[in-house]
Image (cartoon, rainbow, N blue to C red):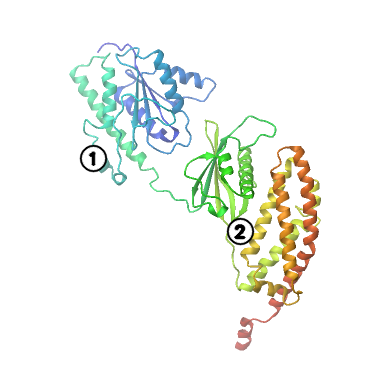
């Protein structure tokens, strides 16, 4: 056999999700043809150093055959493939022929369990060359390896992967001469590699998800991990969102259609300004926390618009790709209340909690959300503090509604028959008015466009908050005291268990 003028250069392009299969194809090509005849390059073998991109371009410029691995898996990263295919197409315009082999430079797609990609991944209007027949896979055949191999006909000459090896072999033979014995050995190596590769594909495909269910609600936010620093820049600029799992209609908006959409477009589609502002605030705070890698306060709370249901929103996973995309997985999990023993005891326990929590939040000297506390809150912390106030007050209102504290039976246990006619209605109307004004002022701060407007909205918010605290202070004191008195009466009264014990004595 004459000395080889050069090796055939093969480059394997793939998405990150298909790296296992790409490596297997690379290994079997090297085994089948040997290092003196074939050079195989694969993106995973390039170190991400300062000369990484130049090395990749140099390799593509000398590539004879570009293999594209496509499996139909959801592409989360979109890392190398698009650049490599586009660059190779450009390189072919200036050098259409292989240097040492009598053939055009080729693009060969390897479609496994999917259709031949056209376009490939993200490349538009890409005309593919030398397409192999797709390797069709039936899910039921992935339970038994021999059945899988027999079904796809790995032993036949029409086997797509065997055709890949023979196609490469035919190119090599334009510059190499082989005798009959060498050809037989070559063919045997190709068939052995083809079989091993099919077994690897069987193993890899068995790792695929057959069915995936989301019993909870999940949102994936994708943003640039390190955006250009700019004063007042919006962390949600150019962000996309994707909604998975159960319906999101409980939050006051229609569940977006499957797939990614821009965060701006989603928020604009929400008809309620309050709901849109709440979700913008949630996304913004969780994105900022993910970029910082700070998850100490990895919790946001949000109620359904009617306050009947409550949810905890948190980041469960933050993924950073080499492409510079930060993928943030957010779960929305419903908060469930718990009853303790007797219904009346449970109701009073929750009533005490509501009364005291309200007092802790607004009415004590050390209260986190008192007018005095907001007066000394700096502008760069103001939005975050007001956001915390909204979610804590939402949680308090949900707890109250969930416990049935506004039901007549509960009100009778707390207030008895001591209220004047119309007194409860007057208190309720005053509470609703002050609560509505407080929410309005709070969301006005969150929506401030610049520091000058933020200063103005802060002043207005503190005035509304001061009125809110003054108007509700006496109501809270009376409500909490009456609730504690009701508990005292309940626990001091002998119950049925006491009477049974005394009877037994």
Residue shown at the point (33%, 38%) measured from the top left: 113
**Mark 2 sits on what residue?**
306
Q: Is residue 44 left or right of residue 281?
A: left
Mark 1 to mark 2 CA distance (whole Å): 59 Å
Q: Is residue 208 visible?
A: yes
Tell which tag, 1 or 2, sits nearer the viewer: 2
Residue furthest to the left in view is 180
Q: Is residue 501 left or right of residue 445?
A: left
Q: Is residue 260 left or right of residue 150?
A: right
Say what secondary structure mark 1 lies in.
helix
Badge number at residue 415: none
Pick whichever of labels 1 and 2 is earlier in the sequence. Answer: 1
User: Which of the image's four quarters has the N terminus?
Assistant: top left
Is disc 1 surrounded by few (<14), some (14 to 19) or many (20+) residues within 10 Å?
A: few
Q: Is residue 23 visible?
A: no
Q: In terms of depth relative to the viewer, which is nearer, 449 or 1?
A: 449
Q: Is residue 80 left or right of residue 236?
A: left
Q: In terms of depth relative to the viewer, which is nearer, 232 or 162?
A: 232
Residue shown at the point (43%, 18%) measured from the top left: 90
**Mark 1 sits on what residue?**
150
Residue shown at the point (51%, 25%) measured from the top left: 48
Q: Residue 254, percent across and down? A: 52, 50
Q: Residue 206, percent across and down? A: 35, 43
Say what secondary structure mark 2 lies in.
loop
Q: Residue 364, percent across and down? A: 79, 58
Q: Quadrant of residue 3?
A: top left
Can you say whether 268 is above or below 339 in the image?
Answer: above
Q: Quadrant of residue 11?
A: top left
Is disc 2 surrounded by few (<14), some (14 to 19) or many (20+) residues within 10 Å?
A: few
Q: Are marks 1 and 2 in contact (CB under 8 Å)?
A: no
Can you say whether 496 is above or below 343 in the image?
Answer: below
């Amino acid at each position: 056999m004459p000395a080889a003028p050069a090796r055939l250069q093969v480059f394997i392009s793939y998405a990150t999700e298909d790296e296992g299969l790409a490596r297997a194809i690379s290994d079997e090509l090297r085994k089948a043809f040997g290092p003196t005849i074939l050079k195989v390059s694969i993106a995973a073998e390039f170190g991400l150093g300062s000369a990484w991109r130049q090395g990749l371009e140099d390799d593509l410029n000398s590539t004879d055959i570009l293999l594209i691995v496509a499996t139909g898996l959801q592409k989360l990263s979109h890392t190398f493939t698009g650049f490599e295919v586009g660059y190779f197409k450009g390189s072919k315009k200036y050098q259409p022929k292989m240097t040492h082999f009598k053939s055009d430079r080729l693009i060969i797609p390897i479609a496994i369990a999917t259709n031949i990609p056209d376009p490939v991944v993200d490349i538009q209007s890409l005309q593919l060359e030398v397409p192999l027949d797709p390797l069709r896979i039936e899910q039921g055949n992935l339970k038994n390896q021999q059945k899988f191999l027999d079904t796809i006909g790995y032993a036949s000459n029409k086997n797509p992967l065997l055709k890949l090896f023979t196609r490469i072999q035919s190119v090599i033979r334009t510059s190499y001469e082989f005798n009959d014995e060498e050809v037989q050995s070559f063919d045997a190596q190709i068939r052995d590699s083809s079989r091993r590769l099919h077994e690897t594909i069987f193993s890899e495909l068995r790792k695929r998800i057959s069915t995936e269910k989301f019993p909870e609600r999940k949102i994936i936010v994708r943003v640039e991990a390190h955006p250009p620093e700019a004063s007042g820049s919006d962390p949600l600029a150019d962000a996309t969102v994707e909604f998975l799992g159960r319906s999101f209609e409980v939050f006051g908006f229609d569940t977006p259609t499957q797939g990614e959409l821009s965060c701006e477009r989603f928020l604009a589609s929400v008809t309620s300004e309050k709901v849109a502002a709440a979700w913008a605030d949630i996304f913004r705070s969780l994105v900022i926390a993910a970029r910082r890698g700070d998850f100490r306060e990895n919790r946001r709370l949000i109620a359904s618009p009617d306050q009947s249901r409550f949810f905890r929103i948190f980041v469960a996973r933050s993924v950073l790709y080499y492409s510079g995309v930060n993928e943030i997985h957010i779960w929305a999990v419903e908060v469930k209340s718990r009853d303790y023993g007797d219904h009346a005891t449970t109701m009073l326990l929750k009533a005490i909690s509501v009364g005291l929590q309200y007092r802790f939040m607004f009415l004590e000297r050390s209260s986190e959300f008192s007018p005095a506390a907001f007066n000394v809150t700096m502008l760069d912390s103001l939005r975050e503090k007001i956001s915390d106030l909204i979610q804590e007050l939402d949680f308090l209102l949900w707890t109250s509604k969930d416990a049935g504290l506004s039901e007549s039976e509960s009100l009778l246990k707390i207030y008895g028959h001591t209220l004047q006619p119309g007194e409860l209605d007057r208190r309720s109307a005053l509470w609703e008015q002050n609560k509505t004004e407080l929410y309005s002022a709070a969301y006005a701060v969150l929506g401030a466009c610049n520091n000058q407007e933020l200063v103005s909205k802060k002043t207005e918010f503190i005035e509304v908050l001061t009125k809110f605290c003054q108007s509700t202070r006496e109501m809270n004191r009376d409500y909490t005291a009456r609730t504690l008195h009701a508990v005292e009466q309940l626990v001091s009264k002998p119950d049925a268990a006491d009477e049974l014990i005394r009877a037994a004595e």
